[in-house]
Image (cartoon, rainbow, N blue to C red):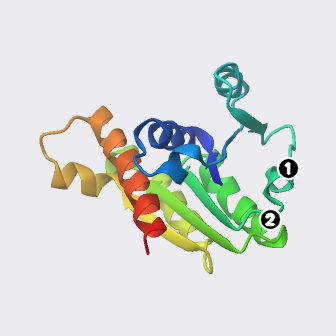
Amino acid sequence: MILAIGGAGCNMAETIMREASVHWVREATYIFADTDHTRLAELGKRGYRTISLIDNENPCEVMKGVEKLYLLAGMGGKTGSEYVKIIAEGAKDAGVQEVSAIVTTPFDFEGEGKVAKAKEAIESLDGIKTTVLRNDDLLEKYADINFASAFNYADMAALKVIELETIQ
């Protein structure tokens, strides 16, 4: 199961669904959890399963019987930073055997506040297998890409993490 949390997580999940080459990743159960009702309504119209985090819908209810869960989120903003740990812990309580988080960090130019919030949120995931994708690393490595393309590179990196874990 792949559970996307917040705007960045939902963007990652949509890219992964579209670009996945490994069958189980394309066919996995995807759930989109957010605090943005407008975004959730748009996703719901496209047939995606959604959970409203501000309406206290419990994402852990759908995790019963799940062996492996990937959480996708962007750190530094509100939703991903605040909910990824809560959902990860809830998943373990629901009996999920393996929980992995794939998270992105904000660009340094987004400000010290967001960067500090991201660092704190990532540190709170102690005990959860976490892959951190630094957006600034993408800009450094691919100097010729623009800001919007950097997000797509992060999404594709998340996809590769998931695909590579499946063959290990």
Q: Residue 58 got which mark? A: 1
Q: Amino acid at mark 1?
A: Asn
Extreme residue in the bottom direction: 127
Q: Secondary structure at mark 1?
A: loop
Q: x, y percentage for residue 112?
A: 42, 55
Q: Which residue is mark 2?
A: 90
* Residue 74 visible to an observer of this rendering: no
Q: Amino acid at mark 2?
A: Gly
Of residues 98 and 51, the one drawn nearer to the viewer in this rendering: 98
Q: Residue at x 47, y 60 (%)?
A: 162
Q: Residue at x 36, y 47 (%)?
A: 156
Q: x, y percentage for residue 27?
A: 58, 45
Note whether 35 is above or below 165 in the view shown. Answer: above
Q: Secondary structure at mark 2?
A: helix
* Residue 3 visible to an observer of this rendering: yes
| Mark 2 neighbour class, 10 Å CA radius: few under 14, some 14 to 19, many 20 or more | some
Q: Quadrant of residue 146?
A: top left
Q: State if disc 2 and disc 1 touch (CB < 8 Å).
A: yes
Q: Quadrant of residue 128?
A: bottom right
Of residues 136 and 11, the one drawn nearer to the viewer in this rendering: 11
Note whether 92 is above or below 162 in the view shown. Answer: below
| Mark 1 neighbour class, 10 Å CA radius: few under 14, some 14 to 19, many 20 or more | some
Q: Quadrant of the C terminus?
A: bottom left
